[in-house]
């Protein structure tokens, strides 16, 4: 008997709309077309996500110059939501914040990347001086941030260095000309960012800053933000703490749309996604084997790529492993088709999708209502959300097997209530007596 706790609460989501029309997921699915930088081949019926988790846009929050508020305000704010940011640091001089602060941030998964050694203007240096700045800052960061890799660069003053030198050391380098990048930038030595804070009147409010991410959602692209000062730390172009919090909250409330990741990991993802080959090497009644390769340097390109395929019709559920280790995956309906979506590391062993035979184990389910309009369930880390327009308590909840058999039912009220469900695929239906919505999730 395996017990898992499932909590349900009301919050904002679009899952009900998605189930009705499939449009949200479909909108996030931008198929690779010729001329978009793709070099790998993907077998039918697999799809590689443009952005991790089949989100609509990538958003990177980057912070320059080691301003104190980045450590005291920004990082705790991002940690609270489990979002990862990028700190571009110099390695000498007054803007260097010290290794302990940087190592602590790296420990929490944030990227520590180069802003050169001296904050010098690369565009005004000869080649050997540029290379000293590029190479020495990278080496120093890698020596002082154990287990982490310095793989990206932010140009001081946003003045680009010589591309052929920068790409010798870095997979992507950041400027700040204000545009949202496409899903496949043509020049990784010229990744633009949007400067935010007090020097930019249009990018110094929650709405003004979030407009950049919204633009990325419209184009399916990558929004990179550039911050310096946070709060009253005296840093250049400071952003108020509550403004930054409003932006982070907006990302948190739209996780199905925005993929928030460090600058380096988004760059890794793009290059892997465009190089990846997905090949189905074996297919049996209860098991499918897939090879995911990208031909890139595995010491640098070590970020998972999101892939999906329709679940075979005879299967109620699935489990996914890579190199015999469990892999993060989910089961979702889109436009009437049930998909298994999984994250795979290219070149790290065979991915096996198996039918995950449903056993007789039962899982405990508990839930409660927290607000109005949307019901969100969590089955371990797997979310299932249901939206009902104008929802009112009490909300009746029913769970069904994929074949339509009712498994459990009851009322979600402000108090926690519990259900017991068998392991496997489960359909949840909620209604307040007038409106109704449903979703599918896996009871692990
Ligand atoms: Zn700077």
Image (cartoon, grey):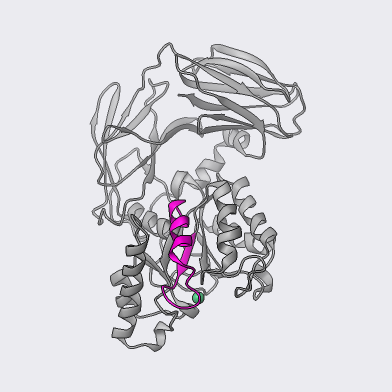
- Judge whether residue 215 can be spotted in this image: no
At x 31%, y 79%, the residue is: 132
- Judge whether residue 6 can be spotted in this image: yes
Look at the image and tell me in which quarter the C terminus lies. Answer: top left
Work out whether 289 lies above or below 59: above
Comparing 113 with 32, the one in front is: 113
Where residue 153 appears, as percent x and y from the top left, is 40, 70
Work out whether 183 lies above or below 328: below
Residue 9 within the segment the image draws in magenta: no
Where residue 202 appears, as percent x and y from the top left, is 67, 70
Which range of residues does the magenta coloring cover?
A: 86-110
At x 30%, y 85%, the residue is: 127
**Count of labels in the image:** 0
At x 62%, y 36%, the residue is: 17
Comparing 303 with 149, the one in front is: 149
Where residue 221 appears, as percent x and y from the top left, is 49, 58
Where residue 294 appears, as percent x and y from the top left, is 27, 51
Residue 89 within the segment the image draws in magenta: yes
Look at the image and tell me in which quarter the N terminus lies. Answer: top left
Is 389 on the left or on the right of 338, as rendered?
Answer: right
């Amino acid at each position: 008997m395996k017990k898992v706790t499932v909590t349900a609460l009301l919050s904002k989501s679009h899952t009900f709309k998605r189930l009705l029309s499939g449009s949200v997921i479909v909108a996030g699915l931008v198929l690779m077309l010729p001329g978009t930088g793709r070099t790998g081949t993907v077998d039918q019926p697999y799809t590689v996500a443009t952005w991790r988790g089949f989100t609509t846009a990538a958003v990177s929050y980057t912070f320059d110059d080691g301003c104190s508020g980045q450590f005291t305000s920004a990082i705790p704010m991002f940690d609270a939501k489990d979002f990862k940011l990028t700190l571009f640091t110099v390695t000498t001089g007054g803007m260097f914040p010290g290794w302990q602060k940087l190592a602590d941030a790296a420990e929490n998964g944030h990227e520590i990347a180069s802003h050169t050694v001296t904050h010098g203007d690369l565009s005004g240096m000869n080649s050997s001086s540029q290379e000293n700045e590029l190479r020495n800052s990278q080496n120093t960061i890698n020596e002082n941030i154990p287990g982490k890799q310095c793989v990206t660069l932010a140009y001081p003053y946003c003045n680009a260095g010589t591309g052929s030198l920068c790409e010798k050391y870095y997979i992507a380098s950041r400027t700040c000309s204000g545009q949202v990048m496409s899903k496949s930038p043509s020049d990784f030595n010229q990744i633009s960012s949007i400067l935010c804070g007090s020097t930019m009147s249009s990018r110094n409010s929650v709405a003004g800053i979030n407009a950049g991410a919204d633009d990325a959602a419209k184009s399916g692209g990558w929004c990179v933000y550039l911050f310096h000062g946070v709060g009253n730390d005296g840093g250049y172009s400071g952003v108020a703490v509550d403004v930054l919090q409003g932006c982070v909250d907006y990302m948190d409330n739209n996780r199905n749309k925005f993929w928030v990741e460090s600058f380096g990991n988004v760059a890794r993802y793009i290059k892997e996604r465009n190089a990846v080959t997905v090949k189905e090497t074996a297919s049996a009644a209860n098991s499918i084997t897939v090879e995911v390769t990208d031909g890139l340097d595995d010491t640098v390109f070590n970020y998972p790529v999101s892939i999906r395929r329709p679940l075979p019709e005879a299967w109620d559920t699935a489990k996914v492993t890579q190199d015999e280790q469990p892999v993060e995956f989910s089961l979702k309906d889109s436009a009437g088709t049930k998909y298994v979506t999984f994250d795979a590391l290219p070149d790290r062993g065979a991915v096996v999708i198996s039918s995950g035979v449903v056993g007789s184990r039962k899982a405990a389910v508990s839930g409660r209502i927290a607000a109005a309009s949307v019901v969100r369930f969590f089955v371990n880390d797997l979310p299932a959300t249901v939206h009902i327009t104008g929802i009112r308590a009490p909300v009746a909840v029913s769970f069904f097997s994929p074949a339509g058999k009712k498994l459990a039912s009851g009322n979600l009220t402000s108090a926690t209530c519990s259900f017991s469900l068998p392991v496997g695929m489960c359909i949840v239906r909620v209604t307040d007596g007038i409106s109704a919505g449903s979703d599918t999730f896996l009871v692990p």
